Amino acid sequence: MSSVDERIACWVSPAIRAMQAYHVPAAGGLVKLDAMENPYTCSQALREEWLNALKAAELNRYPDPDAAATKQALRSVMRVPDELALLVGNGSDEIIQMIITVLAAPGRTVLAPEPGFVMYRILAQALGLRYHGVPLQEDFSLDVGAMLAAIEETRPAVIFMASPNNPTGNLFSRKDMIRIIEAAPGLVVVDEAYFIFAGDGCMDLPVRYPHLLVMRTLSKLGLAGLRVGCVAGNEAWISELDKIRLPYNINVLSQISTDFFLAHYPLLEEQADVIRRDRNVLYQALQRLDGIRVHPSDANFLLFQTTTQAADTVHQALKDRGILIKNLHGTHPLLDQCLRVTVGTAEENEKFLMALGAVLR
């Protein structure tokens, strides 16, 4: 063993050494339908206005440490109740990390329904907490009985529920989530990354349940490159999170850009309307194909299961034809032979359908 390997074995925690890095595949030259991004940009005229706004950035100075203007813009478009405090993060991932770090202590548990967003598990394990996943039902709805039993058994420090859920795409029943919130001994976080496509949300509930936080992101709205997310909740909880927020975590270019594009929020809503419409068209087209089973979605992607060919084979064959989607086979028993496709532009969706049709013949 080399000295480097010896030092790593000695000093890097076993939990970290046992983990795999979060892999993002290269997408150069491919129709990119794997990452739930908004496929639309803005007009050249609006882009010029944005670039002019960026000229005001003082790159020699630190950004506003509190991102006050950005928080106010987020509060407005997200319709955050006045009673709630707001914290801004470098994407949702940083906020998840802050939440788990604040609650981390030996023997504590993070609980979430599965399949779900993989970062709940990755960050829980990296920070030394136990992770307990509760399988969803066959239709991907919450198994409330199993969740309540797991709460009683593990007494989790935090429960994460993503609604709409990634990678299944469905909204969870508000009634079911409230039962879980009311049973939780610790914190509950509802992750609403795909809220703009769902037409429903829980932003009002932390007023009623002070141990509930609602998390959102701009990444699915067409601003993934800015890496800006936020979490709303009771002032006391937000204050605890703020204690470990890294100084200046939202850089000046992201603050200026977020403020600019949220001032044009109707454009992002219009793009979301188009994506919702195209999602329905894509869903109906997939339903007509033999060899797959497609699931309904309230997000900007569709989950489908291959029934006549292996998902690995279909995924690679699509990639060979220039189409990149997400292969979920092997990640969870409920995702056996499953693939996930992001709703792209009408042209991208058509290219995907033609390629999939050719692969399934």
Image (spheres, grey):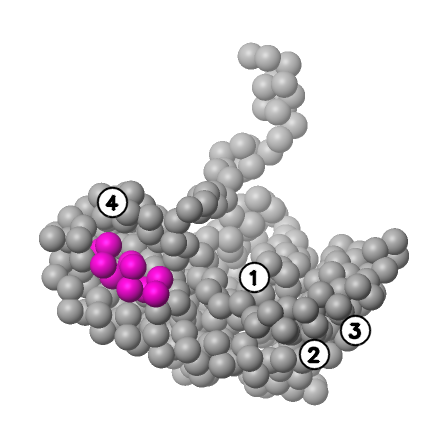
Above or below residue 180? Residue 109 is: above
| Amino acid carrying mark 2 in the image | Ala
Above or below residue 201? Residue 313 is: above
Residue 168 appears in the figure: no
- How far across and how far down the image is residue 318, in percent? 27, 49
**How many angstroms separate mark 1 from mark 3 (CA)?**
21 Å
Secondary structure found at label 4: helix
**How many angstroms separate mark 1 from mark 2 (CA)?**
17 Å
Quarter of image, res 148? bottom left
Secondary structure found at label 2: helix
**How many angstroms separate mark 1 from mark 4 (CA)?**
28 Å
Q: Nearer the viewer, residue 17 or 342?
A: 342
| Amino acid carrying mark 3 in the image | Ala
**How many angstroms separate mark 4 from mark 2 (CA)?**
44 Å
Q: Which residues, given as a range, are shown in magenta?
A: 347-356
Pointer 1 or 2: first along the chain: 2
Above or below residue 333? Residue 275 is: below
Disc on res. 73:
2
Disc on res. 317:
4
Identify which residue is drawn at 24% across, 45% down.
317
Q: Is residue 224 magenta?
A: no
Q: Nearer the viewer, residue 323 or 78?
A: 323
